[in-house]
Each structure stands twice: as structure tokens, then as C-alpha cells.
Amino acid sequence: MKPTLLILSFFAACCVFLPAAADDITVNAIEIIAYGEFQAAPRTTKEAKNTSLGKMTVLEEIELVKQSDVIDAATGTQFGVKYLVKGSPKGTNVALAVRLLHPPTTNPDTKKTATSETWVANAKVGSANYSGWIFEYDWELVPGDWILQLFYKDRKLLEKQFIVKRK
């Protein structure tokens, strides 16, 4: 089954993250650079146990298609936020918890209903990063408020609300 979650740390595929002791890492804020509908090429999949499908897609070549809070849901539509992690040391890889709150969706294969998805995003301090969602199945195309949140060490640093409408 193809995953519906996507995450990308721009440049992660081509850069080596600088090692830093956990005590030496500071994350002060997360600033939105762009938000809305994106397009990207899938690169690989990873396990994501706290999602409806149990997997997520790692993407590359992320491009903003349309900056908007309103997303027209259709199979293949991707939306999310491109953001900058502010902190130090620059270039350090940090793990962010991503939570997506959404109206109830029911996976017809598992019969499980979900109102949230969570996964870990590997982001780079001082670089552009991306976290978002892709609609891959008709059962996911549920209109309503979809809220993307980013956390560092249990501290919410970003929240972006999208209004999903059915095409």
C-alpha cells in the first residue's frame, strides 16, 4: 500500500548532518516559508506506525504549486508547509514530531477510523524543510479543517490550518 504521508528535509539526501550533542542543540522557533499545495517526486518510503497506513513517503524536488489555506482535495493532491528551523548549531539534524489533525477518515482495508496522524520529520537547522500530506485514496478526501503541527521536544512550534474542500 502506498503511504499518504510525506516529509522532506531539503538537502537531506545530499548533505551529511553535523553531529552535535543533544545538550548543544537549541531550537528556538519554526518559521513558515511557504504553505499550500506542493508537487514533489517520491524518493522512498519509511515506517510510520502512528499513521493510517503505517508508512510515510520521503520526497525530493518539492515545489510550491499554489500558496493557499484552501486545498481542493483530489487523489494526488499534496499540501503542507515549507519551513525554517531557527536555532543552533546551523546544519544540525533535529527530529521534529509532526501531527496532522483531520476530520474522521476510515481506512476500508483495516476498518480503522482516525482523526490524527503522527510521524517524525528529520529537519535541518537553518535550512528549508518540508512536511505535509498527500491524498492517495478516495477515502482520505474528507472536507473540513486539517491542522498541521510541528513539535520539538514536546513543545509546539508551528501550527498551520488548512481548509480542505472536495473538488
Image (cartoon, rainbow, N blue to C red):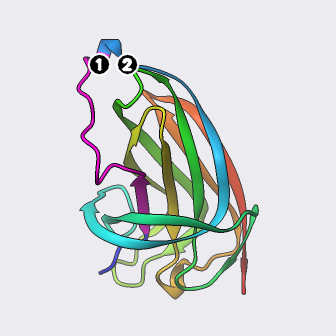
Checking the image for residue 25, the label placed there is: 2
The single residue placed furthest to the front in the displayed view is 14
Q: Residue 31: image x %, image y %?
A: 63, 37
- Residue found 50% across the figure and 53% down from its top: 130
Q: Which amino acid does the dot numbered 1 rest on?
A: Ala
Q: What range of the chain is rendered magenta?
A: 5-22
Q: Residue 160: image x %, image y %?
A: 67, 49
Q: Which amino acid does the dot numbered 2 rest on?
A: Ile
Q: Residue 13: image x %, image y %?
A: 29, 54
Q: Residue 123: image x %, image y %?
A: 40, 41
Q: Residues within 10 Å of mark 2 (few under 14, many from 20)?
A: some
Residue nearer the viewer, 69 or 66: 66
Residue nearer the viewer, 97 or 110: 97
Checking the image for residue 22, the label placed there is: 1
* Residue 115 visible from this viewpoint: no
Instruction: Give left or right: position of 56 versus 142.
Output: left
Q: Residues within 10 Å of mark 1 (few under 14, many from 20)?
A: few
> Answer yes or no: do the residues labelled 2 and 1 have beta carbons within 8 Å?
yes
- Residue found 76% across the figure and 61% down from its top: 69
Image position of 98 with respect to 5: above or below: above
Task: State the image quarter where residue 146 is shown.
Answer: bottom right
SS assignment at label 2: loop
Instruction: Give left or right: position of 85 versus 111.
Output: right
Image position of 159 with respect to 13: above or below: above
- Residue found 35% across the figure and 83% down from its top: 109
SS assignment at label 1: helix
Q: Main secondary structure of the magenta part?
A: loop
